[in-house]
Image (tube, rainbow, N blue to C red):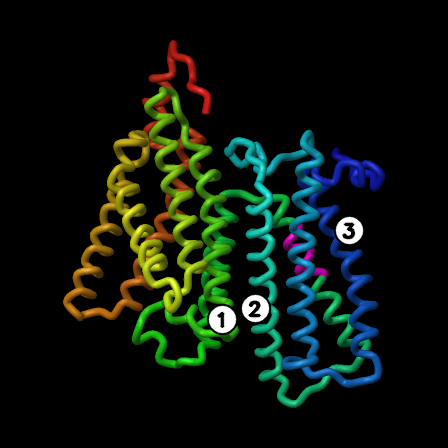
Amino acid sequence: MNQPIPIARLLRHPVASTESRESSALLIGAGVFVVTFIVAWLSFLGREIPISGRGSVGQFVALGSALAAIIMFVIARVLLNTNSTDGAALQGGQDFPTIRLRWYDIGALALAHAVVALLGWLAVADLMAKSFTGAMVFTVPGAILAAVAIAVSSYVVVLSSINLTPMSVSVILVVFLVAGSFTSMLSATDPLWWQKNLSTLGISDDISALAFNLTLIVAGVIVTTIAHYATAAIPVRTAKEVSGRNFVRGSLVLLGVLLACVGIFPVDRFLTARNVAASGMAAVYIAMVLCLQRFIPAMPRVFVLLGYVFVAVIVVLAVFFVTGYYNLTAVELVAFLLIFSWLVVFLRNSRAMGRGDGPNADKAAASMTGSNPVAS
């Protein structure tokens, strides 16, 4: 029968096992609770606090959770990287080779967690305020609620950071894109922005433009992270297969760079650069899908056919736009949805290839007999 891990050993090896990671996250959450309670109590002292709005419990929780998310994500990655014998950027039990995140990967993912926490708690506070119309919160209960919420956020972010996988990164990307896009849409000063195109959201000087452009930049960095995760699991045995995997990896990285450029270059000031980046994304995606079977022959046929269908849909949408049947916003929304859906499914298929449980597993195993694997 397994014995609980002693506290002293837990402090020396905080990410050595699943139990130690859970315990470490709980200890960090407890510390955040104590600190946050003191800060919240001093902030709320001597007054009644609204549930949402300026100076509210909801605002305090949202801002505090965003700040805690950034700090906790970075701390967890530092713990993981400094305890290299205990764990790695990707755990071996998750069927992916070890990959350490680069500093800008960590920054982008930390910011994505912060934005999701910020917008999530603001939405919860607004819903609670509408459920308890006119209700006010006293100092001590308000401080306890704020401390609990921020501690829970810290606990979740620590575990997310430590147990980071390609699939979790893709989920973070999708949630972040949805949250950032809806924030930009809901805060847009022009309610008829959709009659033009998505990039219209990024041309004003208000919070809508900042949210839209920052979302694209951070999302672009996360896509480059996913590019390394997704392709690292693809098995290679020959120099040709290594070249094919590098082509796909480079295409995904370029896709992320171009996505970030769409946010870096607002359409009202850098029209040509923005159009080149947006058009380049579509071109890179189509080229990658059409050449995928050639460069990664072991890729499941069903997934390859799905890519062809997605490309066909994008081409049809482009024709609809040229003929005036659809506006540009509809084309961009559907295209973005298809591309990121394809990326998520690509991650799952590459993982299946890495595990060797796909339809090509037996063939791959047979082809390795008597040959030396090619180093990646």
User: Mark number for residue 183?
Assistant: 1
Amino acid on which the number 3 mark rests in the picture: Leu
Residue 303 in picture, x, y percent from top left:
30, 42
Local SS, label 2:
helix
Amino acid on which the number 2 mark rests in the picture: Leu
Q: Marks 3 and 1, how far apart in space?
A: 33 Å
Residue 349 in picture, x, y percent from top left:
38, 39
> Crowding at label 2, few (<14), some or many (≥20) Cα neighbours within 10 Å?
many
Q: Would you say 30 lies left or right of 316 here?
A: right
Mark 3 vs 1: CB contact within 8 A: no
Q: Would you say 238 lies left or right of 83 here?
A: left
Mark 1 vs 2: CB contact within 8 A: yes
Give the labeled residue for mark 3. Answer: 27
Q: Nearer the viewer, mark 3 or mark 1?
A: 1
Q: Is residue 306 visible?
A: no
Q: Marks 1 and 2, how far apart in space?
A: 8 Å
| Magenta range | 151-158
